[in-house]
Image (cartoon, coloured by chain):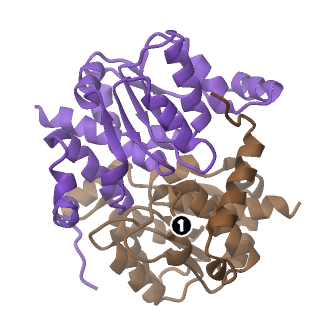
Chain colours: A brown, B purple
Amino acid sequence: MDYVVKPMAIEEKSFEIIDLEMDPKLRNSFTKEELMVIKRVIHTSADFEYSEITKFINEPISHAIRSIKKGVKIYADTNMIKAGINPRTLGRMGCEIVNYVAKPEVIEEAKLRGVTRSIVSMEKACRNPDIKIFIIGNAPTALFTLSEKIRKGEVKPDLVIAVPVGFVGAKESKEDFSLTGIPSVVVNGRKGGSTIAVAIFNAILYLIDNER
Amino acid sequence: MDYVVKPMAIEEKSFEIIDLEMDPKLRNSFTKEELMVIKRVIHTSADFEYSEITKFINEPISHAIRSIKKGVKIYADTNMIKAGINPRTLGRMGCEIVNYVAKPEVIEEAKLRGVTRSIVSMEKACRNPDIKIFIIGNAPTALFTLSEKIRKGEVKPDLVIAVPVGFVGAKESKEDFSLTGIPSVVVNGRKGGSTIAVAIFNAILYLIDNER
């Protein structure tokens, strides 16, 4: 069977198809940079609904780029996100991705308190002033905790990617978070997930790469 | 804000909601084990379309369980899949997940030949007789290569999870693969991805856990 085997050709053709099939009205509602992010999300999910439910709050992309260039620490709520993010640009900027969900002390405290490990891990992240970017692709409880800490003035992120997925609390956690006004990319409703979070963040890293 | 913080309660409630909202006709078309897999895929994507496009070919679940219990090696085409799979049960069975996409010799050969790293990595995997399960969540080219090797009789997997995502070749690679008749879980069309692959495989691991 004949098929395209050249990686750059595959990616170019994919983005052409996405461009063609996307609702032009929606396409024109985004800035050039936002559109790059949206297209990468569709590329990773084959789901055009993301062009309707992905929201950009308070210029998240320019805030993200400035923050990444400072070499901040980044909190990701799953190891899949950590594994999926392109390490090259991050390393060049001196950024590091952290996650505490699998730490023995986090597991133990979560068991003792009868709460998710995501809550305990997020609380720990909020105590670290070097963490300025939060990427949440899985746990609504992590996002609820982050919103509480933001409201109490305990943490003020440069950027939040708020895309937890699921049926219990995901939608509500994102609605609640959106009210904080923090620069963010939010997927409204139930959808989201680790691959969506990775697509959004990698798209921002590619924008930095393309500046060179 | 009040929200559910107990991990088991969140998961139970999620599966209840999925059960309620799923098309009963579709629900009844699956075996009990297949339904567990489908529900976990919906849980991870919040996308009910997966109940229509996910296909079980030649009793993949029982083949998978027998294979995993033998302690086989498993090839996954992305590091995100590797990061997402529950390590506990796999370790207990003596299984190991491998992936060669980031190996320097694979990167070099792919550049020289002008093909994707996924192709070179898959060719390497097909030469390893210990690899009996293939999980493909990303690259159509990896799945095309695997189908070719199966047709030539160079490899005969116990199970393939065939869920590459995207706009160039994904649909075609899955249609082509489905003709091989290998026990498999296939997501038809463009959709799929690493989180879908992980949900399918983890659901099978939970079935093994529940046997105890």
The residue that appears at 34% across and 80% down in the rendered structure is: A172
The residue that appears at 70% across and 55% down in the rendered structure is: A90
Q: Nearer the viewer, residue A156 or B103?
A: B103
Give residue B12's position: percent from left, percent from top.
16, 60
The residue that appears at 51% across and 62% down in the rendered structure is: A47
**Image quarter of residue A51:** bottom right
Identify residue type, mark 1.
Phe
Give residue A81's position: percent from left, percent from top.
51, 53
Q: Which residue is mark 1?
A: A48
Crowd tier of the residue under label 1, counting other residues whose Cα lies within 10 Å: few below 14, some 14–19, many 20 or above: some
Drawn side of residue B168 relative to residue A82, left or right: right
Q: Nearer the viewer, residue A37 or B92?
A: A37
The residue that appears at 72% across and 51% down in the rendered structure is: A13
* The N terminus of chain A - image quarter: top right
* The C terminus of chain A - image quarter: bottom right
Q: Is residue A151 above or below residue B143?
A: below
Mark 1 belongs to chain: A
